[in-house]
Amino acid sequence: MAIKQGKKGINQDDMTVWENFGGEEDMIFCGVFDGHGPMGHKISRRVCDSLPSRVHSRIKSSKSGGNDIVSRQEEGLFRELEKVLVTFFKRIDSELGLDSPYDSFCSGTTAVTVLKQGDCLVIANLGDSRALLGTRGGKNSLKAVQLTVDLKPCVQREAERIVSCKGRVFAMEEEPDVYRVWMPDDDCPGLAMSRAFGDFCLKDYGLLCIPEVFCRKVSRDDEFVVLATDGIWDVLSNEEVVKIVGACKDRSIAAETLVQRAARTWRTKFPASKADDCAVVVLYLNHRPYPREGNVSRAVSTLSWRSGKSNNECH
């Protein structure tokens, strides 16, 4: 895991890795969180601290209560963990609005988390941070499989929900490719995502705190998952990210290598812009060594179960 402050002021990204999660040797929880707004750094920290702790406590209590979540069969495990994740996403968001010491009216955070139990990955996504899988395909080439949808206002189903709730979706003339969420009668706050913790100025106008949750069963070809905030994805493609991580012979430096590459790319790709914060977690799935030759190619993700439809299209 690695984090690097950008050039926009205080670092607002956060991340967590919790091994032996829920007291289980083969369970791990990972997450990255990208805050925004005046109090984004405090909100991302609070969510980063609260979310895994709540889920951990729920799993532990299920054991002592005789309703052990972890002992369920795969689909049952997913459904129970989905329920737990959605419950705590909503509860933490509600707490931010009711009794938080931080002003979350125009501040918030994204979240993308992975809970790995054995060979089952349960991914929860809120906002525009991303989970990416590196997996081996034909001729042992390393393929990039995007596991999450970037939940932005340019996704048609997200825009339709916002508009139906009286919110507005449009791009500014100076940023024609960046669609944002606006209040009905005021050109603010211009949020570039359609789901987030906080941002209560938009919660009545279609902004959701409910994550998309889905499950993927790990295959022997699946090598690693990269969780990263948009400071990575704004300058590096999925294929570039998988290639960079796949080329690291020392797994302990993979996340740091990726962060440093993104920082250099920000300087060359957007020399007039301030680099964004970057947070990266690389979760390795198997211990079988792979030869490193072969090109990175695209792949379509095969998911086992999910909580909602996906749509990568922007209109």
Image (tube, helix red, strand yellow):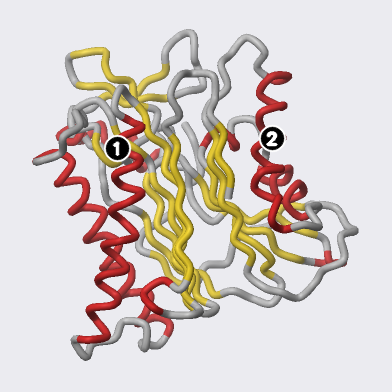
Q: How many marks?
A: 2
**Callout 1, which amino acid?**
Ile
Q: Secondary structure at mark 1?
A: helix
Residue drawn at the location 34% of the way across and 38% of the way down? 109
> How far apart are the alpha carbons under marks 1 and 2?
25 Å
Is 26 situated left or right of 249 in this image? left
Vertical placement of residue 287 versus 2, above or below: below
Vertical placement of residue 202 versus 140, above or below: above
Q: Are marks 1 and 2 in contact (CB under 8 Å)?
A: no
**Callout 2, which amino acid?**
Gln
Q: Of residues 211 and 22, which is closer to you in this image?
A: 22
Query: Circle 2: is it few (<14), some (14-19), or many (20+) Cα within 10 Å?
Result: some
Q: Which residue is mark 1?
A: 43
Question: Which image quarter: residue 86?
Answer: bottom left
- Rendering coords of residue 265 (x, y %): 71, 27
Residue drawn at the location 45% of the way across and 29% of the way down? 11
Vertical placement of residue 164 versus 94, above or below: above
- Rendering coords of residue 41 (x, y %): 36, 32
| Residue sitting farthest toward the left | 98
Residue drawn at the location 69% of the way across and 56% of the way down? 252
Vertical placement of residue 87 versus 234, above or below: below
Question: Which image quarter: residue 55?
Answer: bottom left
Q: Of residues 8 and 187, which is closer to you in this image?
A: 8
- Rendering coords of residue 94 (x, y %): 15, 46
- Rendering coords of residue 2 (x, y %): 58, 44
Q: Secondary structure at mark 2?
A: helix
Q: Of residues 127 and 50, which is closer to you in this image?
A: 50
First in sequence: mark 1 or mark 2?
Answer: 1
Q: Which residue is mark 2?
A: 260
Residue drawn at the location 33% of the way across and 53% of the way down? 211
